[in-house]
Amino acid sequence: MKKKNQTSNTNKYLLAGLTFVCILLMVLSVFYGRISGPFRLLANLTVIPMQQGLNQVGTLLADVSENFGTLGEARRENKNLQTRIDELIMENNNLQEEKYELERLRELYRLDQNYAEYEKVGARVIGMDSGNWFSTFTIDKGSMHGIREDMNVIAGSGLVGIVTKTGPTWATVRSIIDDSSNVSGMVLSTSDKCIVRGDLSLINEGKMRFEQMENNDNKVEVGEQIVTSHISDKYLQGILIGYVSEVQVDSNNLTRSGYITPVVDFKKLQEVLVITKTKAQMTGTDTAEDETPAADPAADPAANDPAAANQGENDPAAADPGANPGGNDAAADSGANPDGNDAAADPGANPDGNDAAADPGVNPDGNDTAADSGANPGENATDGAGTADGGEPEPGGNAPPEG
């Protein structure tokens, strides 16, 4: 009973306290306008700074959390973009390479059209000698593709060089800038012939030397085209070599020399065209394919000795021993020949020229061409004063062999 009374008293006190707070709040609300100033100042000094600090901490924590998420996303996106960039770079490089290759192939196509009269095979350069210049290089086509030695090679706008060696699937090309190269050329407008020499020391300056051009009334100016000559042994006629950049008269006043700018960039050869006919094949002087085997002297001695082949006609005693009743062979038994008409013993007693080998001078019919070449005026004998092909030497002297 006593505990119950105590609980009841406590409830009464709480109810009274709450009633007092309510009354106090009501009174304060009535007089708010008058006392709000001090309370507001107190709140500004204590509560608001604390609230701002808490807001900043919360904002910072929110920003850090958001930044962590954004950073992870940015890293993933950056990785994807970098991968895409690498792919685009590779694709761009391939497109650039294909573009340059297309330009080179178009240039080769134009070159092919310029020399449409010649059959050609395209080839790629797969190797070169040490150095910056393609003086000697290897291509990826060989004898299996119809390539053979002395075939002309062109690229860019004109002549590159000549095939010097072949294999089944490769071939070696010596360019015209090589030190051992000599090309018979001529001025396109005047047909004045010259020799274009290779010189690696000059090609560093972007030029080649020509010489042995006749000093005549034909005026050769800077910019004239130099092409391969029709008298060249190995190079086909009319292939552009370069343009004259300098010309001068030599000290002998008989010839002119100078420099030309080649039309081929010998630093950047990648694709070439090989003309599949040699100069010898074009002119019909190639004997490599149609060569007939030489006669065997042991099998047919008469083939190489006209005197032996004609012995039966000019020496009856040798041709028919039976025709000599006494069996007196003029060559074997000079005693049986009372007149001493032994062609071998007495050439002077043989007025008919029965022994062509004994006395070439009395062989008016030219039966022994080996003994007296002068008795056979129809033969093309080569003497020290002439040339093998009947050509005339260049004005500046004997031209070196082409290659």
Image: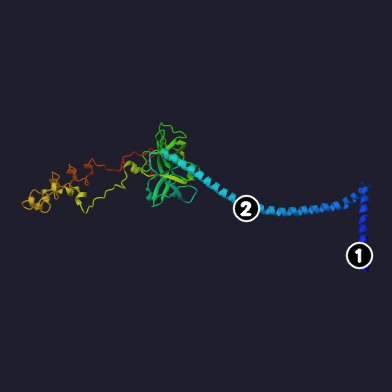
Looking at the rendered image, the quarter that the C terminus falls into is: top left
Reading the image, the residue beneath label 1 is 7
Residue at image position (43%, 40%) is 111
Direction from residue 1 to residue 95 in the image, left or right: left
Asked if 363 appears above or below 331 in the picture, the reply is above
Residue at image position (19%, 50%) is 302
Q: Nearer the viewer, residue 343 or 156?
A: 156
Q: Position of residue 149 (x, y in %)?
A: 37, 48
Amino acid type, callout 1: Thr
Q: Is residue 357 visible?
A: no
Asked whether the residues under the numbered discs 1 and 2 touch, taking CB atoms below 8 Å apart as contact, a structural biologist would say no
Residue at image position (34%, 41%) is 282
Name of the residue lying farthest toward the front: 1
Asked if 24 appears above or below 103 in the picture, the reply is below
Secondary-structure class at tag 2: helix
Reading the image, the residue beneath label 2 is 79
Instruction: Give the mark nearer the N terminus: 1 vs 2.
Output: 1
Looking at the rendered image, the quarter that the N terminus falls into is: bottom right
Name of the residue lying farthest toward the left: 325
Q: For the residues marked 1 and 2, what is the alpha-carbon distance in whole angstroms?
A: 73 Å
